Amino acid sequence: MTGFDLTKLLAERSGERYELHLRHLNHQLPRMLHTIGFDKVYERAEGAYFYDADGNDYLDMLAGFGVMGVGRHHPVVRQALHDVLDAQLADLTRFDCQPLPGLLAEKLLAYAPGLDRVFFGNSGTEAVETALKFARCATGRPRVLYCAHAFHGLTTGSLSVNGEDGFRDGFAPLLPDTPVPLGDLAALERELRRKDVAALVVEPIQGKGVHAAPPGYLRAARELLHKYGALLIADEVQTGLGRTGDFFAYQHEKDVDPDLVCVAKSLSGGYVPVGATLGKEWVFKKVYSSMDRVLVHSASFGSNAQAMAAGLATLAVMDDERLTENARRTGDLLRARLAALVDRYELLHEVRGRGLMIGIEFGKPKSLKLRSRWTMLQAARKGLFAQMVVVPLLQKHRILTQVSGDHLEVIKLIPPLVIGQEEVERFVAAFTQVMDDAHSGGLMWDFGRTLVRQAVANR
């Protein structure tokens, strides 16, 4: 009998959480959290909320970067995991066909007419890696196009199609891939004319900045790609599974038929990492062209029983609780309430997005006093004002949000899909107070000076 006791271990050492990270993991994470005052201690979580030791609730408008689509610790997903563990299945034998992967693939494909098969991996970046490999194999071509400012993951292949230089710096050489502006069909065709392009990988709504593909772009891009023998890869890792008010974001536009679709994040139910690459029959048959190539692309933990059970339970919750419809309804309400504030606050420039994926963009004010303060922040580092908004939302109003990307004055809201009018009212009230403070020259500008000093010190 082992003496391991997880409950006891956590009770004894959970107070060391930040010190343990500082000593043994990414040492910059606790430093960053201390600097901006995000070094909270959360004791538990449920639905769209965290709770501290005193029982204070914190509204989660971040959802673990989109992982917690059905909320934290959903009882249906929890029960499914208890059930699959209690079943003691003969999992990952590598040389049999368990039922759960087939059942989850069947369920996923029902949401994606025109796609035929699924490969299960372990993460979003792995789903993208799979799509890149499959596209190159199916077309016999080396080059993949991606959109400027895109984010598709951080492993080497997906990093090659990452549109942010800050993530790419220090990791060259990468794969032979080329950026094109989102929505620019002429630029796309110029690259396709070289006839070495395997695919275009695109987010229907870019997570960095929350920019949607222009109406008609995805359909026209697919037509161009097929004209030149290339494929369309839709990266739905963040936008998929109901977040935008459609099950997949590409379905917002009629007659878009991707060749490969990448999903992950919410499919996990917030518990077991899982990624999936959905694709057309002919693409899979090109990759797995003979029995000799049966394992030419695989993943050691892909299709494991716990991940498959979590995925099946998550999709059941989404159907039973109509979470896609809720994302559309609640997202429309939240976006409308925030957009109504644009004329009220000169620092607030635009509210955009779709469903429960919303970008709040700030910009240069007109009044002299505010403009001078804005200029001070911009001179130190672009993106500091958005960070100034994020911090009081957490510190004063117990609402967790994120800046949408490095050097961007945009806050991205990607809450669990279970939120409703109560959470909308709480967020709008808190955001209004923060913006009132910003426009009155309140205490948040003192914090802004702290951020300026930190930004200058890090140069």
Image (tube, helix red, strand yellow):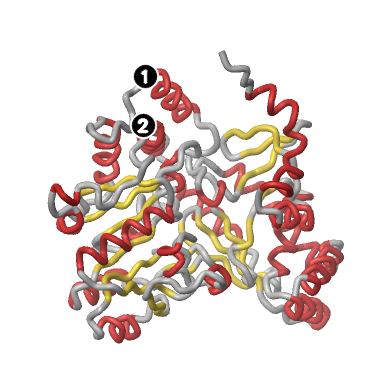
**Residue for point 49% across, 73% down:** 172
The kind of residue tagged 2 is Ala
The kind of residue tagged 1 is Ala
Extreme residue toward the top, this view: 1
Q: Nearer the viewer, residue 346 or 118?
A: 118
> CB under 8 Å between callouts 1 and 2?
yes
The answer to whether residue 44 is above or below residue 457 is above
**Residue for point 72% across, 69% down:** 384
Extreme residue toward the left, this view: 290
Residue at mark 1: 87
User: Residue 67: percent from the left, percent from the top?
Assistant: 50, 46
Q: Which image quadrant is residue 248 in? A: bottom left
**Residue for point 26% across, 64% down:** 135
Q: Any mark on residue 410, and which?
A: none
The answer to whether residue 120 is above or below residue 204 is above
For the N terminus, the image quarter is top right
Spatial CA span between label 1 and label 2: 10 Å
User: Residue 162: percent from the left, percent from the top?
Assistant: 46, 69
The answer to whether residue 80 is above or below residue 419 is above
Residue at mark 2: 305
The answer to whether residue 58 is above or below residue 434 is above
For the C terminus, the image quarter is bottom right
Q: How many marks?
A: 2
Binning the other alpha carbons within 10 Å of mark 1 as few (below 14), some (14 to 19) or many (20 upward) gives few
**Residue for point 69% across, 41% down:** 58
Q: Which image quadrant is residue 125 in? A: bottom left
